[in-house]
Amino acid sequence: MNGQYLFLEPVDVLFFRSNKGFGDPGSYGESMVPPWPSAVAGALRSRILADSGVNLAEFAAGNAVHPEIGRRDSPGSFRLTALQLARRTGNQVEPLYPPPADIVVEDGHVLLASPAALPEGLRSSFPLPLHPVLAQPRRGKPKGGQWLTAAGWEKYLAGQTPAAEELVSSADLWQTDPRVGIGLSAQTRSVEEGRLFTAEAAAFRLRIHGKSKTDTGFLAAVAGCTPPQDGLVRLGADGRAAAVHPVPDLRPAEPDWARIVREGRLRLILAAPGLFRQGWLPEGCKEQKGQFLFDLHGVRGRLVSACVARAETVSGWDLARELPKRAQRCAPPGSVYWLDQVQADEASLQALAEHGLWPEPCPDEFRRAEGFNRVWIAPWAGENKGV
């Protein structure tokens, strides 16, 4: 994937607030890790603007333009093309990946779901012909808070099941740090009695291994701009800081494009929240004669199965206008879509990975610039039981 990679090293606790309201007496504000990509995109855009000497007040008023950031009402050429957790040991940065929805982690082992047709006599309201089925040797309880290492992700991209030792726990990456806040009067900006609330911060881990150390941060990739090469960005709420470190030699794993073309089937995995006009159905899909056909950026196929968790809601704060952004329902990251009867060459598959699940013309240039609808592509794992 094209783009310049940056490792963002937290130098303080970070607050990534969700949509849940807080601030009332006794309320509790949860923090999201990782945050929505718009939080990181906004931090980098603001830093680029400040470095260029653009008058920020004029930009916020819509009267100034930047060659890469654009105007207040148009995003320019800037694109956030990737955002994920990462670990850094010395100068080596290892990307970490949220387990896709077709992976189930249990104590001591990892299972991989595969699409299959239901036996005769079983019916459901699922609109696609194949159901994502998890074959379990015994009943178990899923284990959350796990992340795939780079080695585990390479196995997944190869259509294999990652091993348990290729997972890392959230507890090894960060811990929550509740902070007590005091409500202020909007008129006088003075403390109001009885308005104590709690906001959750994320404190990222630093581990010492003899003469080396491993710290946790975020790996971001940007395109269409000249990103900062050092210094700090204000990341998340309350203006907390993260240091910027370029990662010029990073080459994330890619799938076997030739295998996908040869087999004619694939998996699409959401790398970021999916803002789709048809709800859970990705852009490029349309229903035709009882089938869901996919056609986007030169990749054609048939959507036959999907594993999508409950919808989330994305909003945010428009700093230039000093207004909340429109709340939008989204398919959560890690959602998996299976396509068969794929007609595409390697260049088209790479174009889909590069552009993400956005049609042309794009219905929301700002959300595309902020890194939404990004997608990973992997070969189909397991046996296709047919339709």
Image (spheres, rainbow, N blue to C red):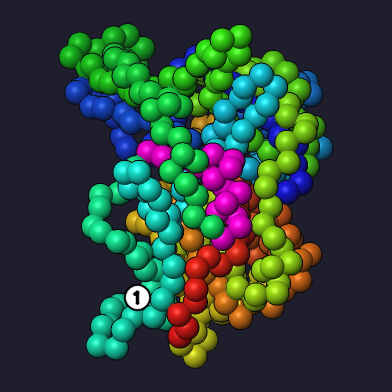
Residue 124 sits in quarter: bottom left
Q: For this view, does 137 lie left or right of residue 384? A: left
Residue 60 visible (yes or no): no
Q: Tell me, yes or no, whether the highlighted magenta stretch contains residue 148.
A: yes
Disc 1 residue crowd, few under 14, some 14–19, many 20+, Cα 10 Å? few
> Which range is magenta?
145-159
Q: For this view, does 241 lie left or right of residue 254? A: left
The correct choice, above or below, for 177 with respect to 285 in the image is above
The correct choice, above or below, for 342 with respect to 360 in the image is below
Residue 343 sits in quarter: bottom right
Residue 154 visible (yes or no): yes
Q: Residue 288, image x and y in percent?
A: 52, 86
Please give the name of the residue rendered at 37% of the width and 38% of the height, measured from the top-left corner: 145
Residue holding disc 1: 126
Q: Residue 61, image x and y in percent?
A: 65, 32
The correct choice, above or below, for 102 with respect to 304 in the image is above
Q: For this view, does 111 lie left or right of residue 72? A: left
